[in-house]
Amino acid sequence: MKNIFKISLVGLVLALVNCKSVNYNDMFYNDVKPEMVSDKFSFTEGPSSDREGNVYFTDQPNDKIYYWDWKTNTIIEFLNKTGRANGTHFDKHDNLFTCSDDQGEIWKISKDKTVQVIAKNFEGKRLNGPNDLWVDSFGGMYFTDPLYERDYWVNFKQEIPHKSLYYRNKEGKIVKLDTFTQPNGIAGSEKFKKLYVSDIDAGKTYVYDILSEGQLSEKRLFCEMGSDGMTLDKHGNLYLTGNGVSVFNREGKKIYQIPIPEKWTSNVTFGGRRNDVLFITASKSVYVLPTRVRGTK
C-alpha cells in the first residue's frame, strides 16, 4: 500500500510540474529584441521548421519558398513555382506540406524538391483555397479552407459555399469537421492533445481536444482574438499574430506582447538548433527572436 501511495504521489507531482504555468520573465530575455533578417519580400507567410531547425517560409505574391539557415543566419531560396504556397508544415519524415491555393491544392514537397499534389477537392468540388495546416502523428493533417479570392486566380468559381476545417487521413480521405466565418491559423500539440483554430474575421480563436485520429471534441472559445498564424511552445503557451505577436497561456490569458515594426505580422514558429528561436514572418520581412523556451514538436 505504501509503494502504491508513493507511485501515485510521484505521478501527481509530475502532473503538476507538466501543468505549471511559466512566467513570461522565464520565457523572454529582457534585453533581446526581434532582429530583422531580411526585408526583400512582398508578403511572407507560413513558417515551419525542419528537423535541423532551419525554417522554411513562403513569399506568396512571388510564388517562392525560402528557408532561414540558422547556422549562418541567412535566407536561401528553396523553390520557385510553388502553387502560390501559403501555410506550411513539416511531417516527421521531413516532407514539407504546403497550402498551395492557386488551384485550391495541398502539396507534399520532399527535400529533393519532388512535388506531389495530395489534395485538391472535397466531395468532387474544388477547395476554396487551403490556408494553413498541421500534420499529426498518424500521418493525417488538419487544414483550414477559408476564401480569399486572389487576383492571380483565373476563371475561379466558388464550388464549396462554406469555409471550414477539414481532416485528411494518410489514405487521402477528407472529412469536414467544422465551419467558421473565416478559418485561418491552425496549430496542434500531440503532447497536450489540443488543436487550435483561428476564426480571424470573427475575432476569436477556438480550442479542441484531440480525441483520436481525426476526431475532435466540441470546440471551445480559447480567446477573443483572431489570428493569421500561430504556434505553441512546450509549456502549451499559444502565440498569435496580427499586430505583432501576442502570447497566451494555456488558460487563454494574454501574458506577453512582442511588438514588430511592420504593418502586419502574419505568422510565427520556433526554429534554430535548440528550437528556441522565434521566427516571425511580417509583411515584407522576416525576424528572429531568441527565447528561453522551446517550441513544441
Image (cartoon, rainbow, N blue to C red):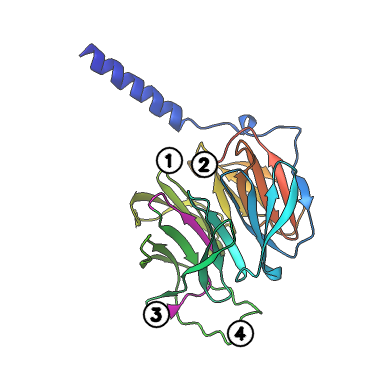
Q: Residue at x 50, y 82 (%)?
A: 158
Residue assigned mark 3: 124
Secondary structure at badge 3 equals: loop
Closer to us: 184 or 85: 85
Residue assigned mark 2: 296
Q: Where does the image place residue 266, in percent across and percent down from the top left?
A: 65, 58
Q: Residue at x 44, y 32 (%)?
A: 19
Q: Is residue 275 visible?
A: yes
What is the spatial separation of the Cα atoms under label 3 and label 1, in whole angstroms? 35 Å
Q: Could you tell me if the residues under marks 3 and 4 are in contact, i.e. CB atoms within 8 Å?
A: no
Q: Residue at x 40, y 54 (%)?
A: 139
What is the spatial separation of the Cα atoms under label 1 and label 4, in whole angstroms? 42 Å
**Sequence-first tag of 1 and 2:** 1
Secondary structure at badge 2 equals: loop
Residue assigned mark 4: 154
Local packing at callout 1 (Cα closer than 10 Å; few below 14, some 14-19, many 20+) is few
Q: Which residues are magenta?
A: 124-138
Closer to us: 146 or 290: 290
**Residue 180, placed above or below residue 198:** below
Give the residue furthest to the bottom. Answer: 155
- Could you say which quadrant of the image residue 62 lies in? bottom right
Asked whether 6 falls inside the magenta stretch, the response is no
**Label 4 is placed on what type of residue?**
Val
